[in-house]
Amino acid sequence: MKGVRLLFGLSVLLGGMAWARPAASFSRSATDFVKSINLGINIGNTFDVPSGNETDWGNQRVTRSLIRLYKSKGINAVRLPVTWGAHFDVDDPEHRLQPAFLDRVQDVVDFCLDEGMVTILNIHHDGGSAGWPKEWLTIDGVNEDRSNQILADLWRQIALRFKDYGEPLVFESFNEIRKAKSHPGEDGQQAGQDDWGGKPLYCKTVNRYAKTFYDVVRATGGNNAKRYLIIPTYAATDYEPSCRAWAHPNPSDNHVMVSIHAYEPVGFTLCGEDPHYNREEFGKRFSEVFALFDEVFLKKGIPVVIGEVNADLRFYDAEKTMPNDADRVNWAKHYGYVAGRAGCPCFLWEPGGKLGMGLIDRKNLTWTHPEVVDGFLRGLKAGRKSQTK
C-alpha cells in the first residue's frame, strides 16, 4: 500500500487518471459495520506522544510485525491515536501538516489495512485540559474560534489524503476534549481544575467541534462522503450528562458512531488499590452504564464504540510479587460479555510493557498478559452469542 502516493503522482502525470483503492460499498449501517469487529486495540503511547516522536514514551517504531502480532490473537481492529500539534504551526493561516509525518501515519494505516484490520484514525492529545496553544483543541472561552478553524484545516488535509480508502478506515473526530485549566468555568470557580462531568457550556462547544469535523470530512468527497465516522462524548466519558448532551451532526446519516472511554468500574481499572474482582458489585455498575448506552444511543441506531478500556495491573502483596492477573481475567470476561451482548465493540488501551495497562513487549514482540486479551475475546464472543437466544 506504500504505492498509493506513487500511483497518485503517476495519475497526475498521466493527465489526472483516477486511481482508487478497492473499496466496499459502504452499504451497511454503522450498527451492522461494527458487528465485524472481534476485539480492537490501541497503539498507545506512540503517535499520540505530544513531542511528535513516536518513540519518546519508550516504545519502538511501529512495524507491520506488531500488527501481525495483534492479528495472531484474533484482534481485527486497531485504533491509531495521533497527536498532530508538533507537526504544524498554529500561526500558519493554512495550518499545513508536515508531509513526512503524514506519510508516516499513512504507512502505519496501510500496515493495519493490509492485515485486514478495521482502522480508526483520530486527533488525540491536541485536545485536553492544558489549553492553548499546547493542547490547541481547547474549551477556554477565548480561543475556540481559532481551535475550530485549525480542526477544520487539519481534518481537510487528513481526509483528502485518505479519501479513496475503503470501508475499513474510520475517522474519529478527537479524543477527550475537556475544559482548559485556564478556563474559570461556568461558575467562575474552576480555574486550574479539570472538568470531566459534562457541564452544558462545555458540551455545547464539543458539539460545535464535532459538527465542524463532520461537515469538513463529508465535503472532501470520494469515499469520505459516506465513510464511517466516530464522535466522542464530552471528554469521552460515560457520565450521564456527557452522554445525554452528545449531539448527532446529521441525524439522517446512519454512518456515525459515538465513542466512549468506559474504564469501568473506575475503582478497579484506574483509581483504586483493591486488586480483587467483585462479580456482584461490578455487574451492578456494568448494568447501569450499558443501560444508559442503550437508552441514549443504541435504541436510536447509534452504535457505541468503547474506544478505550483496560484495567491497571495490581498486586495481591505489598512486595508486588503476585500480580492480579486472575482477577483481571475475570473482569475482562465479565466486561466483554456485557459489551458483546449490547453490541458494543471494545478497543483495549495498550501502552506497551507489562506494568499498568501494558499488554505487549513491543521490543521483542511478545504478549506480556495474553490471558487478559483472551478473557476479553471469550467474554465478547459469549455475549454476542447470547443475543441470539
Image: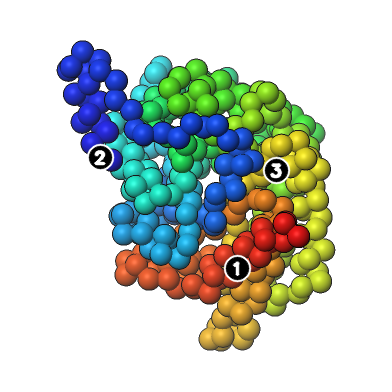
Q: Nearer the viewer, mark 3 or mark 2?
A: 2
User: What residue lies at 74% left-to-right and 29% top-to-bottom?
Assistant: 201
Q: Measure the alpha-carbon separation of dots 2 and 1.
A: 35 Å
Three-letter code, disc 1 = Arg
Q: Position of residue 360 (x, y in %)?
A: 42, 67
Closer to the chain start, of discs 2 and 1, is 2
Q: Measure the alpha-carbon separation of dots 1 and 3.
A: 35 Å
**Label 1 environment density (alpha carbons within 10 Å; few <14, some 14–19, many ≥20):** some
Name the residue carrying label 3.
195
Three-letter code, disc 2 = Lys
User: What residue lies at 41% left-to-right and 17% top-to-bottom?
Assistant: 93
Of 336 and 213, nearer the camera is 336
User: What residue lies at 76% left-to-right and 52% top-to-bottom?
Assistant: 290
- Does residue 86 appear anywhere in the picture? yes
Name the residue carrying label 2.
2
Instruction: State whether residue 266 is above or below residue 51.
Output: below
Name the residue carrying label 1.
378
Secondary structure under tag 1 reads: helix
Q: Nearer the viewer, mark 1 or mark 3?
A: 1
User: What residue lies at 56% left-to-right and 81% top-to-bottom?
Assistant: 323
**Label 2 environment density (alpha carbons within 10 Å; few <14, some 14–19, many ≥20):** few
CB under 8 Å between callouts 3 and 2? no
CB under 8 Å between callouts 1 and 3? no
Of 209 and 74, nearer the camera is 74
Residue 160 sits in which quadrant? top left
Three-letter code, disc 3 = Asp
